[in-house]
Image: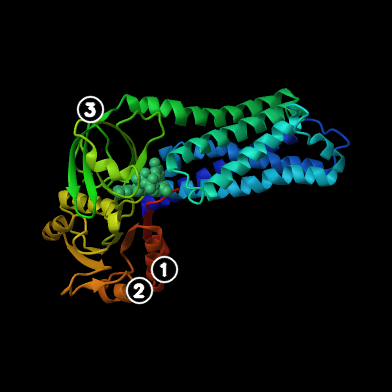
Amino acid sequence: MEVTVRRTINGIFWILVYLALVMAPLFVMLIGPERPGRGFWREFSVALGFAGLGMMGLQFLLTTRFQTITAPYGIDVVYHFHRQITFVALVLILAHPVILLVETPGMLRMLNPFAGLNLVNIGLLSVLALVLLVALSVWRRGFRLRYEPWRLTHGLLATAAVVLAMVHVTMVGYYINTPDKRTLWIIMAALWIGSLVYIRIIKPLYLLTRPYKVAEVIPERGEASTLVIRPDGHRGMTFKPGQFVWLTVGSLPLFLSEHPFSISSSAMKNGAVELTIKKLGDWSSRVSEIQPGTRAYLDGPYGAFSLDMEVADGYVFLAGGVGITPIVGMLRTMADRQDRRPVQLYYGSKDFESATFREELDELKHKLNLDVVYVLEEPHEGWEGERGYITPELLARHLPEDRLTRHYFICGPVPMLNAVTRALNLLGVPQEQVHSEPFNMV
Ligand SMILES: Cc1cc2nc3c(=O)[nH]c(=O)nc-3n(C[C@H](O)[C@H](O)[C@H](O)COP(=O)(O)OP(=O)(O)OC[C@H]3O[C@@H](n4cnc5c(N)ncnc54)[C@H](O)[C@@H]3O)c2cc1C
């Protein structure tokens, strides 16, 4: 309970910090003497532009993955916020030129792209970069843009949008024409650029000083492979069961080639970390070919999807396909800790053959107070267990009597997460006891 209260207070604190930082550019506007002749609409449009720019600048800070900021919400929620707030920033930033043009139609003359890089054109280029960034993010799959080139373009466009907007404000000059305005402006710019330098340079250089090595590659059921990764020359990381890391393997952490994976090993084993990766796309399909001895880098641990963060008298785990990985990590940890709290696992799989960790789950039943319900989409002949998907009716048949006091951890594809969350909702499980880990953050 104490952990939850502390997390809520931290969560509220960081929201207030966020609001203060977004509002900071507006204070820049308000400081100093008012210049006559600037009507309400002009100042209002500038205020909207500044608020939008404040949000865009802070996007760099949101993606730094600072544990203190992400821990109260979970990093997926922070990324979700990062995505959604861009739409708000875009509307505010677009409103700035639109209101100015409606208020002073004569300004249309200044929209001449051939007139050189004047302050209007620089502002327009910034807006263009932002529009392109949003379009590429929304329609990435439609454009058939692979994740890695998208991520590179995304970073470049975001930097261009913010830097050009800052140049635009500097060229306008009016809002940085006193020492206090300039000081505040420099502090904000330093925060934004500093976050960018941290993510792209400082963090990767730090990871380079803490290399790991792939010690083993173990084939698993369900077209998956487990990478056993050991620290090379340092003590490795400590993590909470259920958390995840960003893995770079076979290249340097400077090249944006990292992928997120849940840790499937026990948090009680010092040193090695195990990641179980299913063949899914171009990169993950080559994991089984990785040679032992290959250099790897781990950024983490991250995430709030952990039984250590939600203390309860009993748990229900619900996994879809390879979503079993953080859950098996939690079960292995419970076994190492000789934790006898009751746990029920619902494991949705295509068929029994491809249920990753099937044999180990059988063994864990002897070490833990564990009950496993397999739900197979395509069961083999003679299968007497559950079939289809995890539905409210299926849950109602199996959930234990103390269902309303247990904490629920769901991991798998997003449609499964949504369906199971709705089912639990229907069964009266309080929302704050339901925790989920979507495997697609972008
Ligand atoms: C918190 C978290 C934990 C995960 N844990 C596991 C796990 O334990 N086991 C497992 O098999 N999978 C896990 N995944 C999913 C895994 O990260 C993706 O399947 C993998 O990155 C796909 O890469 P790909 O290039 O092979 O596939 P692609 O077909 O190229 O990509 C498929 C989709 O995966 C996402 N993706 C691709 N590359 C990245 C990247 N570098 N960073 C973020 N997203 C990316 C994109 O949405 C992309 O559209 C996890 C994902 C998240 C967010």
- Sequence order check, earlier mark of 1 and 2: 2
Would you identify the image quadrant in which residue 108 lies?
Answer: top right
Label 2, label 3: how far apart the Cα atoms are: 47 Å
Labelled pair 1, 2 in contact (Cβ < 8 Å): yes
Indicate the amino acid at tag 3.
Asp
Q: Which mark is residue 422?
A: 1
x then y, percent, for residue 186:
63, 26
Q: Residue at x 55, y 28 (%)?
A: 193
Left or right of residue 163, residue 146 in this image: left
- Sequence order check, earlier mark of 1 and 3: 3
Q: Nearer the viewer, residue 408 or 418?
A: 418
Residue that mark 2 sits on: 392
Q: Residues within 10 Å of mark 1 (few under 14, many from 20)?
A: some
Left or right of residue 41, residue 356 in this image: left
Q: Residue at x 39, y 65 (%)?
A: 421
x then y, percent, for residue 294:
23, 31
Q: Which mark is residue 232?
A: 3
Indicate the amino acid at tag 1.
Arg
Left or right of residue 99, residue 23 in this image: left
Quadrant for the N terminus, please: bottom left
Q: Residues within 10 Å of mark 3 (few under 14, many from 20)?
A: some
- Whether 417 is drawn above or below 240: the answer is below
x then y, percent, for residue 408:
33, 61
Indicate the amino acid at tag 2.
Pro
The outermost residue toward the front is 144
Asked whether the viewer can see residue 32, the reply is yes
